Image (spheres, grey):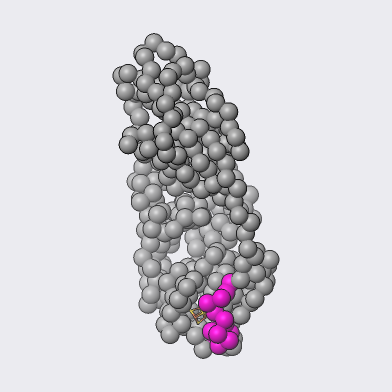
Amino acid sequence: MREPATLSADLLSWYDRHARAMPWRVPPAARQAGTRPDPYRVWLSEVMLQQTTVAAVRDYFHRFTARWPEVTDLAAAADADVMAEWAGLGYYARARNLLKCARAVVAEHDGRFPADHAALLALPGVGPYTAAAVAAIAFDLPETVVDGNVERVITRLHDVHTPLPQAKPEITALARTLTPQARPSDYAQAIMDLGATICTPRNPACGLCPWRDDCAGRLAGSATDLPKKTPKKPKPIRHGIAYIARRVDGAYLLERRPDSGLLGGMLGWPGSDWNEAPGEDPPIRAEWKALNTEARHTFTHFHLRLTVKTALVPMDRAPARGEFHEEFRPGDLPTVMRKAFDLAQK
Ligand code: SF4
């Protein structure tokens, strides 16, 4: 295998020709002409991209930056507006941390993201990956950024057979040897692009890869088997009941979930606990009817089967919990709650 400096130089010249266009990205030619990325947009895109694809994030990114063009705008936003705009993107703790982080940047850093890895890491909701990504991409610091794409490229390039997640320290150490001092911002994005477009999980296009003659995995014929992964335990199934009450004037009974826990801070249908055998817990006295299909949704650690019950209630009946919303937009609900609503509509 050639020297790391030669490998990274070859990857950078590949990136100069093939960089993907992204709404938050400064293309390599503009970068070299002196345009700097906006740290707010880099940070926002990185938070949105965790556990989510570029295709799913684009529209959300455009909506957020149109509504809150600067970090100071986001910091001043109402929590409920941000949670509603995030609805459907999942992993709602990210949205809560997004607001906390924007407010900390305004309160502690004068509205400017710090150009320093340790200071970035100290911000709410910013973990080692996001700190490294913002430091490298926004501030051109020689940080090593390792996401799923980079893990795949590095395990193949070095023919690493240790399974994930145990292989993570080894992968990071190998990736670090390749991180150049010159153009670290472009390099961090280049290796991610290589993983996303060429070194893909099933059919890597090795013939188009700038590292094809160096790649130990390709030469050994093991590339498509890498990275190895420790098999995951099957997810348990939990059950729950969602109560969809509609008042005769068309208002819906909704409840904001507590800030901590799953879907924290999001609006949703009042419901039971989610466990093996949930008990009835209707939020208002009514003649409830169960639908004959369940809403199904998969969270990180379990599958949920949600029984949906509906009722029509008179104007003068007060709920035991939740509030009636006359202006209800299904798009403000998290995906699982929207699935329940869609079933009820049918
Ligand atoms: S040669 Fe193939 S397997 Fe190796 S890094 Fe390039 S695309 Fe991936």
Q: Quadrant of residue 332?
A: top left
The answer to whether residue 115 is visible is: no
Look at 37% across and 38% down and name the residue there: 343
In depth, the one of 137 and 223 nearer the eye is 223
Residue 86 on the magenta segment: no
Residue 173 appears at what percent x and percent y? 66, 72
Look at 55% across and 64% down and name the residue there: 147
Chain part drawn in magenta: 214-227
In depth, the one of 191 and 117 nearer the eye is 191
Look at 37% across and 21% down and name the residue there: 312
Residue 221 on the magenta segment: yes
Q: Quadrant of the N terminus?
A: bottom right
Look at 38% across and 18% down and name the residue there: 313
Q: Quadrant of the C terminus?
A: top left
Residue 180 appears at what percent x and percent y? 56, 75
Residue 8 appears at what percent x and percent y? 53, 79
In this view, 53 is above or below 337: below
